[in-house]
Image (cartoon, rainbow, N blue to C red):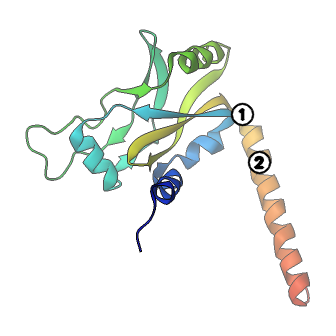
Amino acid sequence: MEMTDREVAASRETDRKLIASNKKARHDYAILKTYEAGIALLGTEVKSLRAGRVSLVDAFAQESDGEIMLYGLHIAEYGYGTWTNHQPRRTRKLLLRRVEINKILDKVREAGLTLVPLSMYFENGWAKVELGLARGKRSYDKRQDMAERDANREIAREMSRHLKGRPRQ
């Protein structure tokens, strides 16, 4: 049984394969807003991404000549690449519409805000980066978030015990 064009298009819309996520960014920063951007890549970089050989840990985005560039993103060299292989930490251009770039740059120019890549994924075969407009957290904010997460975990544990009819230990 063949799929119609509409069914194929619907299945492609939800086709999203996560490559890497930056968990540390959500710990170190308060994410105010997220943006989706394409990324300009070389052929060997795409092959390395498909193999999952990427690290977002030290990456950040910044303005350069009116464009938004991604710095510090590490995409490992492709194992079967030849002289055409890429540099692992080269600067990469983010693909956004001019209106979006202007909005983002206006917000980034505010004091204390930065652009941090949160995750990288393939959507309909295209490599995408989820950028977060972020404000750095102070150490007491991080402790407060951890305490809140632990409290919620304990509440969920107690609710589970109560629903299963087990006494508290």
Image quadrant holding the N terminus, namely bottom left
The residue lying at 44 percent from left, 65 percent from top is: 3
Which is more N-terminal, label 1 or label 2?
1
| Residue 141 pos. (x, y %) | 76, 39
Left or right of 100? Residue 137 is right
The front one of 133 and 148 is 133
- SS at mark 1 in the image: loop
Q: Residue placed at 72% from the left, 33% from the top?
A: 138
Q: Are the two marked residues, 2 and 1, in contact with CB atoms closer than 8 angstroms?
A: no
Q: What element carries label 2?
A: helix
Q: Nearer the viewer, mark 2 or mark 1?
A: 2
Image mark for residue 138: 1
Give the residue pinned by disc 2. 145
Camera-side residue of 55 and 63: 63
Q: What residue type is labelled 2?
A: Asp
Measuring 43% from the left and 27% from the top, which residue is drawn there? 95
Q: Position of residue 123 (x, y in %)?
A: 46, 48
